[in-house]
């Protein structure tokens, strides 16, 4: 077994320090996490994508600006900003434990087969659910998992030799997967979006945000299902070869149960440790992931299974963690910039701006959607926009309407960004898998849905804002 790269050990050490601080809060592990995060970014600097380097450059520039403008207690502000960056980096990196267990899980293989081997209408609905459920566990990895299955199962032979049927089937399945995955920022208890908002807006609590997000996500999925039904080519229905649907509800229940187990375990840690849910998730995610992985090996005995799990985790983490360099850089920089920016914005100026008569309070959630979706169209990651806006709002002395309304607007914009931006990793990955330009998927295929989604979400959030107000 090859020794892991030094940067993998740096990232693993940072995760250990952040988890130690969650379990027993102390300054020493926080200091360790800050140092190890900086060391990891330096070690992987040369191989990072340009957008990651730009984000780090912005973070450094903002730090210099804060020092020159005489920010009060700069050491404390810098430490707090690094703590947020390390938290976001750990939240993302911890998904490795669930992804690695899912990679070889028979349960995942059964469930993905169940989603694809269905008649057209039911297949759309199940792929949407699959994009959402697997998106919670695998994040963007769900697009590779189910996207590859779509490519394999959607052969010309399976379409009865009819190319038009094959192309339409491909479009419907890809859109079902993309739309299902897109609601994870809204409706996933494990999403980085929820962690960002709960961290940036201390007045928020998961017990109000998560139900609202899930309800909003269900509306988005229902809209997509309705559009799919209305656009289904009835004139080709009689040419579609009959399908013998797979029946494996136990596999679907198993995946849903795993998601619920991570959430309930986090709730237990939230109660036991007195930590916020977003930080409790840092403990529950690797714990459940390792347990799930161990379940695959313990058939040969506890001692042998434990050794095999340890070897696999070390080997795969050594290969995978350095590959996270770009995501870690963007996420940690976004958290750093958001926290530092919130300390530099004069609260009275921000309060006057968001309370201006030119910005009616009921329109603020809609503007939040635009503020996240718009920059995503030109390649600015939604986490950057959402983090900076939410952190700036936290500096305001008061908000003109409930924080839930503004937060929901930000993550609704995140959802629409996934559906509409050809520069997101999700669109580019799906385009590569099916051999189509990303612009074809998000603009030609999904453009009408995105527009309808914006109109529906704008109306829904305006109603919610009025109700909260």
Image (cartoon, grey):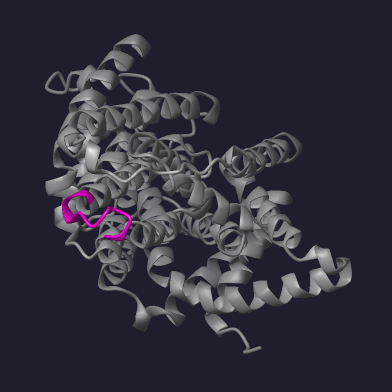
Task: Decide if residue 190 is on the left or right side of residue 275.
Answer: left
Residue 450 in view in this figure? yes
Residue 340, image x, y percentages: 38, 52
Task: Decide if residue 248 is on the left or right side of residue 151.
Answer: right
First to last magenta residue range: 155-165
Residue appearing at x 19%, y 58% in the figure: 438
Residue 296, picture quadrant: bottom right
| Residue 453 in the image: above or below residue 275 | above
Residue appearing at x 55%, y 60% in the figure: 99
Q: Going by the picture, which residue comes out furthest to the bottom?
A: 2
Residue appearing at x 70%, y 41% in the figure: 265
Residue 241, image x, y percentages: 31, 46
| Residue 75 in the image: above or below residue 232 | below
Residue appearing at x 23%, y 57% in the figure: 161
Report the number of discs. Answer: 0
Residue 318, picture quadrant: bottom right
157 in magenta: yes
Quadrant for the N terminus, please: bottom right
Task: Decide if residue 54 is on the left or right side of residue 356.
Answer: right
Along the line of sight, the residue nearer the viewer: 197 or 185: 185
Residue 248, image x, y percentages: 58, 42
Along the line of sight, the residue nearer the viewer: 97 or 367: 97
């Amino acid at each position: 077994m090859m020794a892991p790269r030094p940067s993998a050990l740096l990232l693993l050490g940072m995760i250990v320090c952040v988890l130690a601080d969650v379990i027993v809060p102390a300054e020493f592990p926080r200091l360790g996490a800050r140092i190890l995060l900086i060391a990891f970014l330096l070690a992987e600097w040369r191989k990072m994508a340009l957008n990651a380097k730009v984000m780090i450059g912005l973070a450094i520039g903002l730090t210099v600006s804060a020092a020159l403008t005489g920010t009060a207690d700069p050491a404390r502000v810098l430490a707090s900003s690094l703590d947020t960056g390390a938290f976001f980096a750990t939240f993302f990196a911890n998904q490795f434990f669930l992804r690695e267990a899912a990679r070889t899980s028979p349960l995942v293989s059964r469930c993905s087969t169940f989603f694809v081997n269905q008649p057209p209408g039911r297949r759309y609905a199940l792929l949407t659910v699959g994009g959402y459920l697997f998106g919670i566990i695998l994040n963007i990895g769900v697009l590779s998992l189910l996207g590859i299955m779509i490519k394999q199962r959607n052969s010309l032979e399976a379409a009865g030799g009819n190319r038009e049927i094959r192309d339409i089937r491909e479009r419907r399945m890809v859109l079902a997967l993309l739309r299902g995955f897109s609601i994870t920022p809204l409706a996933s208890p494990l999403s980085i979006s929820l962690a960002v908002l709960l961290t940036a807006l201390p007045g928020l609590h998961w017990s109000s945000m998560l139900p609202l997000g899930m309800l909003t996500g269900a509306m988005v999925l229902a809209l997509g299902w309705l559009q799919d039904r209305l656009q289904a080519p009835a004139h080709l229905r009689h040419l579609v070869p009959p399908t013998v649907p797979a029946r494996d509800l136990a596999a679907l229940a198993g995946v849903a149960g795993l998601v619920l187990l991570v959430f309930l375990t986090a709730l237990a840690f939230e109660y036991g440790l007195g930590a916020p849910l977003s930080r409790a998730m840092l403990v529950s995610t690797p714990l459940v992931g390792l347990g799930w992985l161990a379940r695959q090996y313990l058939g040969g005995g506890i001692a042998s299974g434990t050794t095999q799990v340890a070897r696999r985790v070390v080997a795969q983490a050594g290969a995978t963690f350095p590959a996270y360099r770009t995501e870690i850089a963007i996420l940690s920089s976004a958290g750093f910039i958001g926290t530092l920016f919130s300390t530099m914005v004069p609260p009275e100026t921000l309060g006057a701006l968001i309370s201006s008569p030119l910005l009616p309070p009921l329109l603020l959630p809609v503007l939040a959607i635009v503020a996240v979706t718009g920059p995503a169209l030109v390649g600015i990651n939604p986490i950057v926009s959402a983090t900076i806006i939410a952190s700036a709002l936290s500096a305001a002395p008061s908000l003109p309407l409930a924080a839930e309304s503004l937060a929901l607007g930000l993550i609704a914009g995140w959802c629409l960004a996934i559906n509409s931006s050809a520069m997101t990793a999700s669109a580019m990955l799906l385009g590569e898998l099916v051999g189509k330009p990303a612009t074809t998927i998000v603009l030609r295929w999904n453009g009408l849905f995105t527009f309808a989604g914006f109109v529906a979400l704008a109306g829904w959030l305006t109603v919610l804002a009025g109700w909260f107000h």
